Image (cartoon, coloured by chain):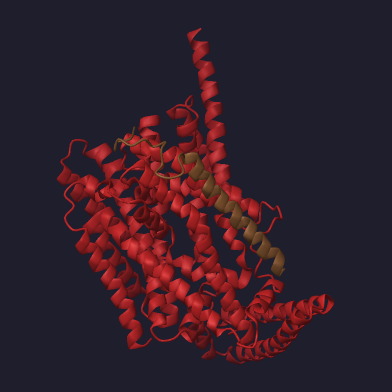
Chain colours: A red, B brown
């Protein structure tokens, strides 16, 4: 990395953190610290919501997802705008009216203490682990590609976040997220424009897109109904809706963002802004992955994107095998490139038969390249059994490091760091709030002073920050980072959403019935995860539907028993 | 009434919240239609 890249990277990060700390110094009460004095405007809330959701994983994994699997991942977000409407219409006015600090406070108002504790506990487990992954995921990719020390990178991200999240609370989180979001949006659009300029001059842009289409990368909407398929329009609309409902309606890291709204209107507009912008933003990030894919149709791609690991294998006895595979991979690429140029020429002539034949040939050669890539992974696994060989998360950053101009590399690394910090700060802020309000204040210090709660909030936020760093430092890489976080969320979200759905919409169900139902539903979801092949997005539906149905059943039974006893 | 003495049923634009929700859902429908066209056109 050049000096200019370092200046851009560190300058951006330090400016955002310093400005956030300076701008939000001196919160004197708990409402100021945890809810930002309820003074936020809708655009701050909207950007803050988006920044909390957009972790570094979003920017590392998503282009790689498009590179390998095409655009269909965008369907995962189709349920989000619908959830924004429901949360705005139902959840926001009630949370504002009850003046809650956390979503789980409402569960005690509606049911009882044990249900509130259960909801809060599920959140703390799930979000506490996720906070560790949020720091760990970008750190492992950055360190393996840039040669940095992993522990140092984790501590660097963690400490920077802790500084402003602990000192300024929710206001600092929102202020910094606004700037971080600006860096993320600006950086990623700038990257997209640069990748566009790298496409060959002698090929029409529309024709390159047609090449991507013929190779199955512009499969934005797929209508095939398959419950085990993670990304199609049905799982996106239904599963994505339930996941987004759970995340935005019941996850304190998001609820806290819109509770800072000056009014119901500001909170609602913040959520709806996210509902309007999120799908196009994901489309853009995925499209950059497709552009990178197109770049590598005209320029030789590596057989394995994690270059440092590839170089480590060169030092082993498996080097000849890997080099042989690389040579074969390059040969097939050259043949494929020739066919792609022929395909582009065929587009101009409009000969559909020729286009179909050439498309089949290109896809056949692409499959050959994929086979060689799989063989290379097998060789790498033999040479380095301990190494992580999931390559998807390295595609974009590897491209950035190799092909982006000086300065832009620093900017894009700032994008990844900003994303890591913005989501982690939202998580730590929410973890600290829930621990303070739902556990400490509710159970151990009911009559404390404002100062006592303020200090407790800061201490708990600090402890969660240190735990996240510790978890990140000892975590091992999971199959695919973005999916790991989503799977983790889906294990608990269904049950939590079920609790809130019953709370909001089924007044006849009481605390004990919903509590038992939630325990059974959670046990069943965990069973499904370990012993069935059901796609993880469906856990949200299964969990929430089970809570609703079982709680209604238990309420009915217990109601009948009471009637029998009284009669 | 909310804590800020504001009528939550009266947004600053489009008269009613229902109309704003329709805009959000219409935007989603438009995007899905656009994505469908992209899928079909380039496949």
Q: Is residue A453 left or right of residue A207?
A: left
Q: Nearer the viewer, residue A160 or B8?
A: B8
Which percent across, then down, holds residue A88?
44, 43
Where's residue A416, x and y in %? Answer: 41, 71
Locate residue A418, reporting x and y percent. 36, 68
**Quarter in which the N terminus of chain A is drawn:** bottom left
**Res A387 visible:** no
> Which residue is farthest right?
A353
The answer, for residue A546, to whether it is visible in the render is yes
Q: In this rendering, is residue A299 above or below A255?
A: below
Up-down relation of residue A278 to residue A404 (above or below): above
At 34% from the left and 32% from the top, the residue drawn is B1
Q: Nearer the viewer, residue A472 or A267?
A: A267
Which residue is drawn at the image coordinates 82% and 79% (left, top)?
A354
Choose top left, top right, bottom left or bottom right for residue A208. bottom right
Q: Is A5 placed left or right of A482 in the picture?
A: left
| Residue at the image position 55 percent from the left and 64 percent from the top | A283
When asked about the image quadrant of residue A167, the answer is bottom left
Please provide percent x and percent y for residue A358: 78, 80
Tag count in the figure?
0
Where A136 falls versus A7 (above or below)?
Answer: above
């Amino acid at each position: 990395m050049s000096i200019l890249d370092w200046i851009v990277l560190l300058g951006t990060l330090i400016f955002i953190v310093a400005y956030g700390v300076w701008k939000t110094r001196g919160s004197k009460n708990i409402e100021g610290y945890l809810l930002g004095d309820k003074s936020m405007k809708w655009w701050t809330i909207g950007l803050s919501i988006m920044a909390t959701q957009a972790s570094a994983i979003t920017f590392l994994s998503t282009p790689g997802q498009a590179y390998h699997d095409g655009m269909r991942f965008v369907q995962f977000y189709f349920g989000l705008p619908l959830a924004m409407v429901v949360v705005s219409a139902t959840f926001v006015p009630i949370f504002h009216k009850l003046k809650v600090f956390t979503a789980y406070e409402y569960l005690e108002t509606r049911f009882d203490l044990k249900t509130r504790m259960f909801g809060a506990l599920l959140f703390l487990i799930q979000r506490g682990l996720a906070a560790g992954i949020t720091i760990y995921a970008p750190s492992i990719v950055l360190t393996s590609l840039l040669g940095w020390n992993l522990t140092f990178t984790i501590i660097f991200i963690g400490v920077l976040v802790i500084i402003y999240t602990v000192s300024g609370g929710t206001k600092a989180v929102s202020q910094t997220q606004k700037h971080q979001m600006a860096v993320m949006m600006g950086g990623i659009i700038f990257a997209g424009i640069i990748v566009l300029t790298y496409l060959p001059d002698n090929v029409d842009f529309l024709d390159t897109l047609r090449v991507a289409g013929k190779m199955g990368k512009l499969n934005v909407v797929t209508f095939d109904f398959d419950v085990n398929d993670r990304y199609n329009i049905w799982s996106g609309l239904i599963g994505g809706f339930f996941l987004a409902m759970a995340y935005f309606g019941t996850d304190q890291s998001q609820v806290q963002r819109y509770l800072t709204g000056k009014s119901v209107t500001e909170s609602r507009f913040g959520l709806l802004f996210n509902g309007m912008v999120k799908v196009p933003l994901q489309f853009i990030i995925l499209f950059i992955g497709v552009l990178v894919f197109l770049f590598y149709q005209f320029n030789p791609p590596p057989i394995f994107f994690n270059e440092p690991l590839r170089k480590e294998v060169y030092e082993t006895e498996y080097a000849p095998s890997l080099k042989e595979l690389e040579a074969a991979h390059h040969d097939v690429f050259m043949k494929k490139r020739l066919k792609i140029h022929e395909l582009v020429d065929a587009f101009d002539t409009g000969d559909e038969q020729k286009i179909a034949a050439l498309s089949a040939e290109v896809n056949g050669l692409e499959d050959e390249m994929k086979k060689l890539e799989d063989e290379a992974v097998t060789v790498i696994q033999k040479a380095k059994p301990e190494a992580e060989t999931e390559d998807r998360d390295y595609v974009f950053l590897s491209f950035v490091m190799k092909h982006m101009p000086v300065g832009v590399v620093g900017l894009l690394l700032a994008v990844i760091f900003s994303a890591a910090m913005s989501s982690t700060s939202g998580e730590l802020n929410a973890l600290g709030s829930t621990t303070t309000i739902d556990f400490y204040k509710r159970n151990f210090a009911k009559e404390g002073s404002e100062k006592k709660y303020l200090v407790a909030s800061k201490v708990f936020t600090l402890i969660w920050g240190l735990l996240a760093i510790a978890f990140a430092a000892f975590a091992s890489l999971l199959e695919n980072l973005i999916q790991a976080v989503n799977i983790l969320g889906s294990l608990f979200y269904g049950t939590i959403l079920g609790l809130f759905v019953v709370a909001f919409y089924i007044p006849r169900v009481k605390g004990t019935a919903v509590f038992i139902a939630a325990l059974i539903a959670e046990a069943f979801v965990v069973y499904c995860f370990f012993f069935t092949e059901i796609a993880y997005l469906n856990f949200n539906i299964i969990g929430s539907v089970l809570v609703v149905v079982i709680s209604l059943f238990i309420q009915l039974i217990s109601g009948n028993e009471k009637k029998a006893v009284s009669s | 009434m909310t804590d800020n003495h504001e009528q939550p049923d009266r947004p600053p634009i489009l008269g009613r919240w229902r109309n704003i929700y329709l805009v959000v859902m219409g935007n989603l429908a438009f995007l899905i239609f656009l994505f469908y066209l992209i899928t079909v056109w380039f496949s």
